[in-house]
Image (cartoon, helix red, strand yellow):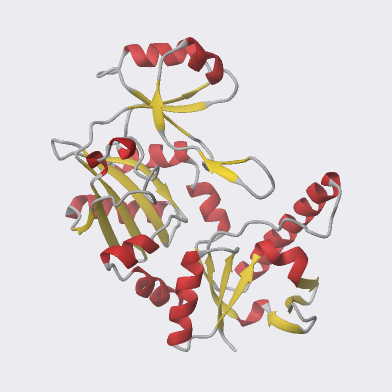
Amino acid sequence: MEKILIITSKPDLHADYLEEKLNKQKIQFVRFNADELANRFLVTYTENGGHVILETKDGKKCELFKPNEITAIWYRKPFLTKFDRIKQNINVAFAGRETDAYLQDLCLSLFESGCKWINHPESNRVADNKIFQLRLAQQLGLHVPKTIVTNNTEEVLDFYKHIEPKQLIYKTLSHPFISETAETFRSVFTSHLEISQQTMESIKFAPCLIQEQIDKDHELRITVIGDRLFTARIFSQDTLSTTIDWRRDQHKIKLRQELATLDPNIERLCFQLLKQLNLIFGTIDMIVTPTGEHVFLEVNPNGQWLWIETILGAPISDALITELV
């Protein structure tokens, strides 16, 4: 039986939402939560193929899927399990590496079967490189902020000397999460960068992505799925705490936002960018300056979109289902 496979973790409101819509439309699918792999799943692979078994809380076992049954995959946001049965940290680290290797093998076997990916993890990995994104966007004709990536404080000071106005921002090169314990983490948001002795000392520890701070009228979150595009206009300058990064307090305040129509040329460049990155799905963040110039910030191959559908009414999940079936 042909099935859609959702690879994600718990909790995932986006996957929950799509799961409900798939059930209503009676579309066959299975959900594979990577964080439960060590505690609820029994996996087997041989040279002749493989299968994944789900062990329920009452001890019953049922076959979740075989790779040759899957026709399309939504590779959402899988995170590895906490490995509750393992007590020593050194063994947890080893089990984590082995589990990650299995997941990569599983993805490879599914890729070889010819099923459709949204998106393939290798495409996500390449597209997630922020330096590569900026370079490609600029080559396509999108305007990007002046940028430097360095741990050399002299280079930072020289960069600062040549920009106007004298405002810098810092953003992470990798994902913006810092784990504080096994169960908790915090986010590192894009922030204003002060030229101070403390900042200069911190920069030496690792390469930092530093950009000129662009004046904003508003911001855009552009969600691309296949040949469809949905644009949300975000009035991030209405509130002081969201002027640099609108994500900072988006769950605490009612940020003004609306659906918008994108400039046709910018729309064309967005489609070109995702095509170059080999992505079917992606969310693009842009600034619109007070003079109307569009400035590309980044593309997230697995960005959040549910709020654009539930608050603003954009039929993003329908477009996603259309691509999957």
Residue depicted at x 77% and y 57%: 83
Q: Quadrant of residue 166?
A: top left
Quarter placement of the C terminus: bottom left
Question: Is there any visible trace of residue 259 in the rendered image?
Answer: yes
Residue depicted at x 40% and y 52%: 276
Looking at the image, which residue sits at the far front?
252
Residue depicted at x 34% and y 47%: 285
Residue depicted at x 26% and y 57%: 231
Question: Of 116 and 244, which appears nearest the observer?
Answer: 244
Look at the picture and state if 183 lies above or below 216: below
Question: Of 293 and 259, which appears nearest the observer?
Answer: 259
Question: Of 93 and 251, which appears nearest the observer?
Answer: 251
Look at the picture and state if 113 lies above or below 161: below
Could you tell me how many numbered marks the image carries? Answer: 0
Quarter placement of the N terminus: bottom right
242 left or right of 121? left
Q: In the rendering, at what x and y percent does residue 274 appear?
A: 38, 54
306 left or right of 32? left
Looking at the image, which residue sits at the far left?
291
Q: In the rendering, at what x and y percent does residue 63 appear?
A: 72, 83
Look at the picture and state if 318 lies above or below 123: below
54 left or right of 296? right
Look at the picture and state if 45 lies above or below 297: below
Q: In the rendering, at what x and y percent does residue 160 appear?
A: 36, 15
303 left or right of 36? left
